[in-house]
Amino acid sequence: MHIIDTHCHIGLHKYEPVETLLFHMQRAGVDQAVFIQYMGNTDNAYLAETIAAYPGKFAAAMLVPPDDDGSAIRAWAEQGVGGIRLAANFRGTGSDSLAHWRTANELGLVVSAPSSPASLASAEFAEVLGLFPDLSIVIEHLGGAKPGMAPEEFEPVLVLAAHANLTIKLPGFGEFCHLPHPFRDVPDFADRVLEAFGPRRVMWGSDWPPVSSREGYDSSLSFPMDYFADLSPNERGWIFGKTAQKVWELAVVY
């Protein structure tokens, strides 16, 4: 199985450099990864440099200032950054509050959207879905599922499966299960997402390195793989690699 991790943070001043991530990827059998710029950092140079240094190995989602008119987005896209991180209910502070969304749509970027059930149900996100029905949006962190969340609170995430341009990230289960690992009494959030979206619109992402404070990198992959062991090899192939390969346009690298 070709495995792609769709949610990793790297950095030189926060978190860890890419060499540390590569160590964990190799040990866990992960082939490719997507960098998600960490909050507060709009300097995407390290992401762009790393993508260039490892051709075909990585993709990335940038962050830009909230008042950007699209200029910064275009500049980073020209350097190979193919995605942008925008909260589901994000609005810019410039003259065009939708400039980030509009530019992403024009350039064909992938939007990685940190969210909660409330922000996914917001009027702001509904407007984005109406204006940009072909924009590829990836819902981060299983829509904000948390330990102890009531089943009805999670419902707005599932309703969004009606929008064909949306995919969703399956994180390490430590994000929505009570620690310690191995997890017991696993809530059915992942099952409900898989039923609503289908394997071809679900993609695994570890949330490295924050996952190190939960179940750790290896278990963030092995636990969901074991959890979905009854799925067909093809279905698991989509969740753990092929969905990401399609959305992020990552060619298989051997």
Image: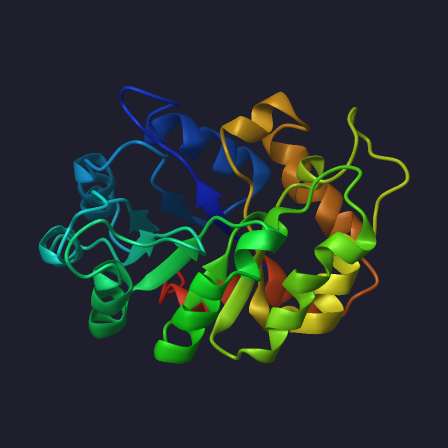
**In the image, is residue 254 above or below residue 210?**
below
Q: Toward the viewer: 10 or 164? A: 164
Q: Residue 48, percent across and down?
A: 20, 44
Q: Toward the viewer: 186 or 3? A: 186
**In the image, is residue 115 above or below residue 193?**
above
Q: Residue 97, percent across and down?
A: 24, 59
Q: Toward the viewer: 46 or 131? A: 131
Q: Residue 202, percent across and down?
A: 60, 63
Farthest residue in the right direction? Answer: 185
> Is residue 28 found left or right of 151 in the rendered image?
left
Can I make out residue 85 in this image?
yes
- What residue do we see at 48% from left, 70% from top? 126
Q: Residue 25, percent across and down?
A: 49, 38
Q: In which quarter of the image is the C terminus?
A: bottom left
> Is residue 195 found left or right of 7 in the rendered image?
right
- What residue do we see at 63% from left, 28% from top? 216
**In the image, is residue 194 above or below residue 117?**
below
- What residue do we see at 20% from left, 66% from top? 103
Count of labels shown?
Answer: 0
**On the image, which quarter does residue 120 sit in?**
bottom right
Q: Toward the viewer: 115 or 240? A: 115
- What residue do we see at 44% from left, 73% from top? 129
Q: How is the image coloured?
A: rainbow
> Is residue 117 found left or right of 68 in the rendered image?
right
Can I make out residue 170 in this image?
no
> Is residue 53 found left or right of 176 in the rendered image?
left
Q: In which quarter of the image is the N terminus?
A: bottom right
